[in-house]
Image: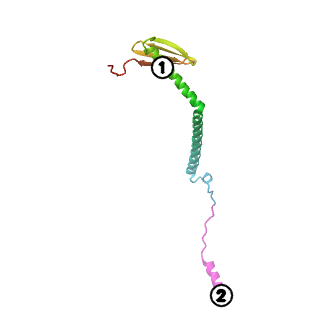
Amino acid sequence: MKRTILALSVLLLATSVQATEMVWQFNNPSFSGMGYSSHTMTIYTQELSRKLALAAEKKAAEIKAENEAKNTTMARFVANLESRIYNELARQITEKLFEGVGTQVNGNFGFNGGTISYTSDGTVITLNITDDAGNITTVTVPIGDFGWIQP
């Protein structure tokens, strides 16, 4: 038995042993530098996409709040009232320019802190709308039959 143990010991000691130097490395590319640029781009892309998503959510919330404010009963009433007032003003200007009795070729009136003046030279109607800040908007409309054939 001693011989068997001795033979096994000699065989084990006779085999060659190979070893390499143990090298410790960082796994994180931020420390090792290997693959650092792709690591940095990945982080940048994730941060950018999150910032853009947050900005889009904020903008959507603002638009939703605006739409809800415009859709209240009071807001719809005010918009409808303004529309009717503007229609009435347009009707009155049209009557003064085109109706037979009391036709006026020019005139003006105040409205909402500004003035609206109109003139007609027989071929063109010119509207000058001046707001309360003094800004002037000019609208020129040609007078004609608009392609209608009169009987």
Helix, strand or loop under label 2: helix
- Looking at the image, residue 132 lies above or below residue 48: above
Whole-percent x, y for residue 51 in the image: 59, 43
Q: Position of residue 70 (x, y in %)?
A: 57, 33
Query: Left or right: where does residue 8 sit relative to residue 107?
Result: right
- Foreground of the two, 95 or 112: 95
Q: Nearer the viewer, residue 39 or 16?
A: 39
Q: Residue at x 60, y 70 (%)?
A: 18
* Coordinates of residue 21 in the picture (x, y in percent): 62, 64
Q: As displayed, is residue 116 above or below residue 67?
A: above
Nearer the observer, 93 or 136:
93
Q: Residue at x 64, y 86 (%)?
A: 4
For residue 149, what is the image quadrant? top left
Q: Nearer the viewer, residue 110 or 40?
A: 110
Residue lying at 41% horizontally and 15% vertically, measured from the top left = 124
Quadrant of the image for the C terminus? top left
Give the residue pinned by disc 2. Answer: 3
Say above or below: 72 vs 140: below
Q: Which mark is residue 9?
A: none
Callout 2 amino acid: Arg
Q: How is the image coloured?
A: rainbow
Residue 133, by quadrant, is top right
Mark 1: which amino acid?
A: Arg
The circle drawn on residue 91 is 1
Q: How far across and down, in percent of the image, does residue 63 sit?
A: 57, 37
Residue 3 lies in the magenta stretch = yes
For the residues carrying marks 1 and 2, which lies nearer the camera in this image?
1
Q: Which residues are magenta?
A: 1-23
Q: Is residue 97 magenta?
A: no
